[in-house]
Amino acid sequence: MKPSFDRQIDRQGTWAEKYDARETLFGRADVIPMWVADMDLATPDFVLAAIQSRLNHPILGYTQVPLSVAQSVSDWQQRQHQWAPAAESVVWLSGVVSGIYLSIQAVTQPGDAVMVFTPVYPPFMRSVTHLERRLVEVPLSVSQEQTPRYELDWQAIETAMRTQQIKLLLLSNPHNPSGRVWSRVSLLRLAELCLRYQITVVADEVWSDLLLDTQSKHHPFASLSPEISAQTITLNAPSKTFNLAAMQTAYAIIENEQLRRQFLHIQQRTRAGEAGLLGLHALQAAYSDAGAAWLASLLVYLRDNVARATKALASCLPELVIMRPQASYLLWLDASAYFSEQQHQVDWWINQAGLGLSNGTHFGAIAQGFMRMNVGCCQQQLQQALLQVQQVSSQLTKQENSHVFD
Ligand SMILES: Cc1ncc(COP(=O)(O)O)c(C=O)c1O
């Protein structure tokens, strides 16, 4: 039976950050939350059943993870992305962000330069500055095609690589916040540069399963060649795909044994968390035939949500520039035509539209004028959110220098 994603599920009282942090973040608890990247859709029932089944045994002691669980990661990568890393190259983590912090410590020293392409998921920048490395931000450029998309700015990248002694690149593949799926050609060119300048790459591929655009394909960075794999740490998790963030279960894939040893050394020395028992059972159940079938249905639903949201927003806010995601359930919205001040825009989405979006400027100073909208929810909730925008959209007029609404 095909899963139904139409059920509206009340998450209040479940310690859900997306809901419970609203008062603190938005100053009011009644906004429809469309910010942090989890979905208001149920985790598949066979995944929940696997967790419950483990709880039938009454002892929850320390865990030794069998290699078969790592093999299910490899099998899933093979099934989804035609990449079959050895099970032995899998390192268990308590989160992808934890893997970013560990990678930085494993590969660089304080003061070393770490490159990111902005705008980008905020912990990419925060981790570098927290660990007292030097953050080198290279802004993405926007393609001038009919559908606006981010592109890698080759000239800026090469200049930075040539002049800044970059040690590590943090790559969001596919890209958060825009949902851009990098083409094989672009990734190969990037890999070639990283090889030439001896830059290790952290490829955060947590969005890779949620591929909406049937014309695109996700290419694991490490799958491009054995040479590039030798200097790549891939990070991934079932958390976005199967809505399992609370399970705190993620993994690194590091095919280079020496690099893996360096990573494990830092993981042990910092006592950084590994994956939890219940999360591992969830992962194993998710990375299966049933998981693949469920995911295919989810993608149909998310594609439809993105299409509905894009259409509704474009019709009521014609000057809004919408970056349609090729992957993920995130819309990257440029409303700078309506607002000259980001704070006015933030206030408008909260207090006029009644929605809690992510502030674009958290993804880099370059993202002035942007907001990120999470449409990973049931259609009833999405329709309500879009209706709320439609009802107040006439307040906004295209601005030259300032913004007006009341
Ligand atoms: C690119 C990216 N990496 C990592 C994460 C979070 O990973 P985790 O919760 O496993 O630390 C997110 C969540 O939104 C993300 O978008």
Image (cartoon, rainbow, N blue to C red):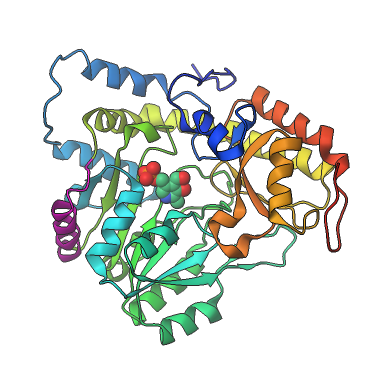
Q: Position of residue 320 (x, y in %)?
A: 77, 51
Work out whether residue 300 can be spotted: no
Question: Going 25% across and 33% down the picture, which residue do you hit?
Answer: 280
Q: Quadrant of the C terminus?
A: top right
Q: Position of residue 356 (x, y in %)?
A: 62, 37
Q: Quadrant of residue 76?
A: top left
Q: Position of residue 55 (x, y in %)?
A: 22, 16
Query: Depth check: 227 or 324 in front?
Result: 324
143 lies above or below 267: below
Q: Which residues are magenta?
A: 257-274
51 lies above or below 109: above
Work out whether residue 309 can be spotted: yes
Query: Depth check: 15 or 114 in front?
Result: 15
- Magenta stretch holds residue 266: yes
Question: Going 58% across and 53% down the picture, which residue do you hit?
Answer: 178
- Magenta stretch holds residue 229: no
Q: Position of residue 122 (x, y in %)?
A: 48, 55
